[in-house]
Amino acid sequence: MSGSDSGGAGRPTATGEVGATSGTGVPAPRFAGAAEIAGGVRSGRLLPRDVVEEHLARIESAEADVHAFNLVSADAARAAADRLDAAVADGRDPGALAGVPVVLKDNLCTRGVPTTCSSRILEGWLPPYDATVVQRVVAAGAIVMGKTNLDEFAMGSSTENSAFGPTHNPHDLSRVPGGSSGGSAAAVAAGFAALGLGSDTGGSIRQPAALCGVVGVKPTYGVVSRYGLIAFASSLDQIGPFARSVADAALLFDVIAGPDPADSTSLRDDPPSASARLGEGVDGLRVGIVTELATAEGIAGDVVARAREAADALAAAGAKVDEVSVPAVVYGLSAYYLIAPAEASSNLARYDGVRYGLRLTGGEAGRDGDDGDITEMYLRTRSAGFGAEVKRRIMLGTYALSAGYYDAYYGKAQQVRTLIIRDFEAAYERFDVLLAPTAPTTAFPLGAKTADPLTMYLNDVCTIPSNLAGHPAVSVPFGAGDDGLPIGVQVLAPALGETVMFQVAAALEAAAPPLAAPRLYSEGGTR
Amino acid sequence: MTEVATTTQWETVIGLEVHVELRTETKLFCGCRNRFGDDPNTSICPVCLGLPGSLPVLNRAAVEYAMRIGTALHCRVQPSIFHRKNYFYPDMPKDYQISQYDIPINADGWLELPGGRRIGIVRAHMEEDTGKSTHVGGGGRIHEAGYSLVDYNRAGVPLVEIVSAPELRSAEEARAYVDELRAIVVVTGASDGKMEEGSLRVDANVSIRPVASSELGTRCEIKNLNSLRSLGRAIDFEVARQIDLISAGGKVAQETRYWDEVSGRTGSMRSKEEAEDYRYFPEPDLVPVEPSEEWVQAVAASIPLLPAARREAVTAAAGLPAGSDAVITVVHLDLDRYVHAVAGAGGDAALAVRRLANEVAAEIDSIDRLGVDAFAKLIGMEATGALTTAQARTVLKELLESGGDPESVASRLGFEAMGAGDLAAVVDRVIREHPSEWERYRAGEDKLTGFFVGHIKSATDGKADLKAASALLRAQRA
């Protein structure tokens, strides 16, 4: 990892302004958002190189505590900023994300830059291509700051299942950032970048967004190309934005959404606009609180309370709010833990040591110049290369697809998926959007749930239904828990309903209690 | 009881799985060149290497070729989906193969053997080919090899797998089926059908059962039969092996076997218990294939005449009985246009079929020198007696060697038409020169026909139309 040799938390900055005063009386920084930076760069008021240096300085000061990154690409970021400086000077359009620092979850392929999935199995592999979303943000002028940590192969809800160690929550370094996109969520919360990209298979963007107090979006399946996203569960995976505001998330969504001939599941029509109706309010919109998700197993009282308050705030803003039952969502978690591991067991088969990444051979069976049997190579490589959670899911999925079990497990789970879609469709006949908690609790302490996978899996109970249905959902920060840590509330919408979803999310954001800045800074910087 | 009575008569039951490589420009799911014989690992990309994050995009041309094959095999062409077939092997980049499973693009068709029998086609589905492994050392098998080399140029090449019903009854019939199938995939333009380059590969499911039994016996699958000769030999060996096994009181074990060309034997590869559980499930990276009705119809309209229809047309033109070997040969060698030219000119099409299936077939490599019009004219000259059979054969051989016009060739060779009056004079002379034989012939000794015809032939230097000569002899005798 490389860092910046300049700057520090307290140094005057290009974009940081003195913001809300925290309880300790230390002024907490208010980080400039994406729209603000892009506007400044486009108008020539901000120099991309200054923006980059300022973010690198923050990374330098706090990354050791947060560990959001698997790789900080400082030199490449500086070079990109300089190219952008030249473009602006030449009068060329620097793009909608001009000069905006962005972080990439480390399961998005970057040409010539290590892409690890936070797994040992991809050791040494350099992708020969950029993911479609990476091409799009770079083409829009964004500056890639680095690759962020995740639960290995995006399997987890705390970013503790990383081969490179956990990421810490900037709001409380003793707690998890959520996961699996915990690195991107933490980086955006900590001001290491204005925007982040993550992937959401069962809540992997929205849950860490909630726990880190940022906005996280899971788009409609097929709206954002998956080309270059290293697959976990192909029928559920979607790439989506992290930002510190709904408007910034919408800005990034509008850049990455749209058809891609390289992804067969990419929708062919123009995507819905996320920015179109921001600021139009919610007057007359019908909002349904999903009864089953507001009362699901293990949802903490403060989380339910914030969700109710969010509904009240929308009602106060003119929305018609009511409760709605979506009965099949209670089977979502069970169905998910058959479908996702089943697809994962197949998607992860290719990590066999034959072509790239880790290869372990030899040992006792090795003969003269002979690296042992092929089966032995597979076993050694995969045993050493994958962590416990990945192995657990490969085994679960292999079992679920086995002859004689397919119908009872995978087949049945797909039927549940159909039921969930049907029940959502019924709800959307009466409501424009639905409301639900994002995560059952605020950020939990590191290590609190690692011993019991089932408890960890329950983190996704409110987010999974959207993945199974292929529908969009966004987590918006809405107040804090009894422990003072951020809580997120989800706005769910029908397929391709992003425009109204962002419209409601913006209203929710406007009505939300002010969010405390990350203690990382409010408590006087790094420990 | 006699020995014959205790010996069970066995029936052979064969079903074939034929893999055909499609002759698309590019691979099934990426833009890499689909070409045989390139340097190893030069036609590869992130998609066909299965690199992390890559995704497949279906090649429309491959779907079109698959539909052509299905249409030509009288299948139902239907909306279909892809599945993943999961198993580990180094030449399979993703460690799963994208294939079709329970909803293939083509189902329930038939193929008509040249003899006229119809063999059921269960399905003809799309899938991707694997790479090619070379196991160095250890007898060429992966587990004993010192090391293995893998060429991924073939990985992702589009295949159609054609699965027959277990309705073939002999090695000969299996060969005829593959030969016919090869002709069909070639004529539809879907494949070059080259077995020697691996464009067409055959697995055979072989079992035996007592004659008149309706139950199927336990089958063995013999993998990778890459020539018609291997196919026939392997089936014959396997049938004999199974009969010996059962006759000795044993049982056939369901298993996969390999064919060893050198020893001429099949050997066990893996038993049913060792068989992989492929854990098929729908491929989530691809969307269903739903060809429009217009597309399906356009494909159907684009299919040229198939061998069976061509045989029927030749048979009808020549007025021959169905199933004629000569007709099969003529169509197989793509000579039917010669027959139709003769028939179209009102000539003797049956004679044309005979000449094509024999003299022309023997010199098929020279076919380009034989003009259709020249051939039709030659047949006309023979049919009208302007040339004798022997002369016509000689002229035909000359045409195949050097080309040209049959009349000028005949005249150059001195094959002038012998007038009817000239022939009658020769016949009279021969009768006069052999009075005692003539008396015996007149008395009914028919075998002397040959004697007289032989003398007429030598007296005319072979120019006589011997049929006409025989007719004259019979007329004189009456």
Image (spheres, rainbow, N blue to C red):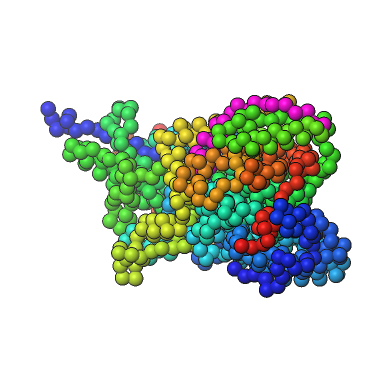
Q: Which residue is drawn at 64% across and 37% down?
A: A302
Q: Which of A381 and A193 is in front in this view?
A: A193
Q: Could you say where residue B156 lies in the image, as x and y percent from the top left?
A: 54, 53
Q: In this view, does A380 lie to the left or right of A128?
A: left
Q: Which residue is drawn at 30% across and 64% down?
A: A364
Q: In which quarter of the image is residue A321?
A: top right
Label the magenta part by its dominant secondary structure.
helix
Q: In which quarter of the image is residue A92?
A: bottom right
Q: In which quarter of the image is residue A471?
A: top right
Q: Nearer the viewer, residue B407 or A402?
A: A402
**Residues drawn in magenta:** A318-343
Q: Nearer the viewer, residue B257 or B5?
A: B257
User: Can residue B349 be seen here?
Assistant: no
Q: Does the magenta stretch include residue B451?
A: no
**Eyeballing the image, is B149 above or below B24?**
below
User: Can residue A320 be seen here?
Assistant: yes
Q: Is residue A155 left or right of residue A524?
A: left
